[in-house]
Image: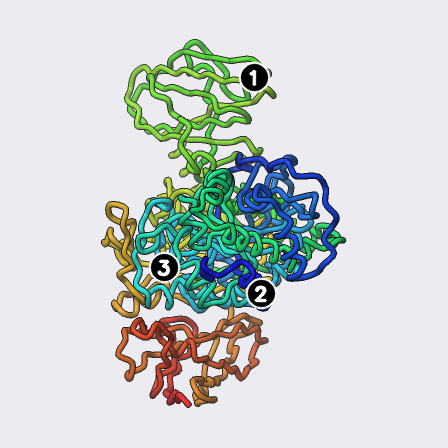
Amino acid sequence: MSEAVSRRSAMRLLAAAGTAGTALGAAACAPEVPPGAAAPEAPSAAPPVEAKGAARVDALVERLTLDEKTALLHGARDPAPLGQAGYVPGVPRLGIPALRLADGPAGVRVAQPATALPAPVLLASAFDPALAREYGRVIGREGRALGQDVLLAPMVNLIRTPYAGRNFETFAEDPGLTADLVGELIRGIQDEGLIATVKHFALNNQEHGRDTVDVIAAERTLHETELRGFEAAVAAGAGAVMGAYNKVNGVHACESKPLLDELLRGSWGFDGWVMSDWDATHSTVAAIGAGLDMEMPGGTHFGGPLREAVRGGSVAEDAVDLAVHRILATMDRFGLLAARPAARPPRDAAAGARTARKVATAGAVLLRNEHGTLPLTGAAARSIAVIGPTGQVPFVGGGGSAQVVPDGAPAPLTAIRQRAGNGASVRYALGEDVYGRPLPAKLLTPAAALDERAVAPGQVWTHEGEFRLTADDEWTLLVHYTGKRPVVRLDGEELFPVRQGVAEYFAGGLLGSAPDGMSVRRRTLALKAGAHRLAVTAEGGDKGQRFRLRHTTGAIRAADLAEAVRTAKSARSVVLFAYEDATEGRDRTSLALPGGQERLIEAVAAANPRTTVVLNTSSSTTMPWLPRTGAVLQMYYPGQEGGGATADLLFGDVDPGGRLTQTFPTDERATPVGGDPLRYPGVSGRQEYSEGIHVGHRWYDAQRVTPLFPFGHGLSYTTWHYEKLTVRPERAGRLRVEFTVRNTGRRKGTEVAQVYVGPCAELELDQPVRALAGYRRLVLAPGEAQRVTVDIGARVLSSWDPEQHAWVLGSGRREVFVGRSSRELPLRSKAVVTSR
């Protein structure tokens, strides 16, 4: 909708269209409610507005002062914070309530406990839109129960590069699958009365330079890849959209008229409101003119500067009224302006936990299973070695906006012991120490106990001394603390300086805090033999604090590795937990497992070939150790019920039903962005999506690159057979695909049957070698067969024509493929797509 539309005309258009919208939850790049301008003092109380619907919103806008209007267009400090990401003050004299906005891609992120659900990428791996809706309903109910009105989720940016730090927060590399899932997830959230915010609009596909990079993408690339999920969110009725940090084709996303006004509102008919990501607003006049309605988290541009712009004439008050109307109309749609708003429901923690476990088992992907390593049965289930730090400390979720305070999270080791039973032997070895050992007091001169130190309120504790090494060694020093971070200097260098921005606050979901909740920072150094000076200063602050200084050394790492090997040799089976701790605010620097984990896997698998590696990782991982293992189970970040879900899968109580929503490369060069810095991470602040429409598995097919594991891959504990494929035109622009899937094994199993379609020879446009056209999740008993029907719609069979600025149908003869992954497609047939 153009800013030139008069306020009255805009009101009529909005009233006719309703208040559907798109939802997006940016990572809200602040750990707590950020400071902002407080709401201005309101005029004296006014009689309540009695009208309903659009008339009520019109009447409210008419009665608001300019100060009150602009206070609704930006965040402020919450007078009674709940630990949420943002707050917008209401206007009490007119009955307009405040809004509280919480992060929530994997559960509601506030200061109170909530269900910590599996990461969205694990949900997506189930290929089950109905499960996505159930997942959304848990978040929607809990958000309401925990005092929130707006959820800053889901994140639907595509998995474009495996290095992106937030891949675990999103769904897939495939645009169609992403669109299917986001639509149902939003419906689930909003079924419960919580406003969903789809994010980050658009092309926020990496953390590196996210607030400055200029992403260059052609019109066709945008429509056929990144925009599909956002368009589906609008169609699902999302209430809000979050603008991205980055620039899109030369303009900041939060002041891009082509994105916000012409596409989002004009082409798609979005009538909710658009908010900025946290501190992603860069102007006043340009931003509100382009269609940004709300600046978060404060009022740097939409507070005083916006009022002055209206009074000075550079912004028409109609533009402010229109933005306010969008926000109030959405609030009204969700019942927030009603005289008697719906009561908030109680939390149902037990129901949330059940869904968390269901999703974790449904999305787990069995990547490898040689010689029947899994499931654990018979002797293999009675003698088990569990190895790795995340076997004992559950890896619940990634860092940043997705972190949730769970009700509890049992360790996988505990769940495995319970499932194995009293007669089994389940031994544990750490393998790698991620939280450090106490520094021996006698190591230091003068002697000092630096473990579990307490500093009283208002006090300062210091230590200065030295320690001596007899040989060169690699040390990792770690500080654990509960208050202001202690200053630790080694040989005069400060080891743990406070970093700028989100890098300081978002330190990872596993490594950023100790099991007892203390914050953790670490630093690895190559130390020479001889004396080293150590100085520590810790302040108690207002409340006092506890801290500890810990370390690991080469000798400690070697001893942990040796213990893991001994434990592996003593058991019939090994379950080795490996991790990679991703977080908002930084990208991965390698696709390899961090630390000494590759050496650990190699050594343990050499000692016991019946080794299952359970991966708690954010995205695809390189696996030079793969051939030595018996099995590999991809669990991503499995949420608070991940321990129990992992045990369910290991012992075969459920069939691993997940399939990869992203391609796993053989090495770091063999990816769509590998070796091309202009594609990733960008050069001189500019990034080009020169792969065009060939995102993810499409690129591997186009370049004929063999992946380590293809898109859609996932093994089962039973076997499957596909047969009797028929493909026929159903009506204009549609195909109906039918085939039979049979469980040919001896166990009940879960299968995800996948349908792909080839290019249209009649379209003179670049097209994928194969595009995902549909899928069905099946659960079949041994010997059971099911006839499956998948309808392929016109959108899948169309391409975006940049000359016509529209979708054009790829009519004529098309080839259809059916099978278990993008590279395992035993059935194929052809049919003619008709245009009328």
Name the spot of residue 683 as percent of width and height, x first. Answer: 24, 48
Identity, as a three-letter code, of the amino acid under mark 2? Arg
Query: Which residue is labeled 1 in the image?
Result: 455
Q: Badge 2: how crowded within 10 Å, few (<14), some, or many (20+)?
A: few
Q: Secondary structure at mark 3?
A: loop
Q: Secondary structure at mark 1?
A: strand
Between residues 834 and 253, which one lies in front from this camera angle? 253
Question: Residue 694, image x and y in percent?
Answer: 31, 66
Residue 733 x/y as whole percent: 43, 84
Mark 3 or mark 2: which comes first in sequence?
A: 2
**According to the image, label 2 marks what residue?**
12
Q: Is the Cβ of the residue at disc 3 closer than 8 Å to that at disc 2? A: no
Task: Answer yes or no: is residue 119 visible.
Answer: no
- Of marks 3 and 2, the one in the foreground: 2
Question: Which amino acid type corresponds to the residue marked 1 in the rendered image?
Answer: Val
- Position of 566 with respect to 407 (left or right) is left
Secondary structure type for disc 2: helix
The residue that label 3 is drawn on is: 664
Judged by depth in the image, the label closer to the viewer, 3 or 1, is 1
User: How far apart are the two marked residues, 3 and 1, measured between alpha carbons?
Assistant: 48 Å
Q: Residue at x 72, y 42 (%)?
A: 45
- Mark identifier at residue 433: none
Marks 2/1: CA–CA distance? 63 Å
Q: Are marks 2 and 1 in contact (CB under 8 Å)?
A: no
Lower sequence index among marks 2 and 1: 2
Give the answer, above or below, for where 492 lies relative to 610: above
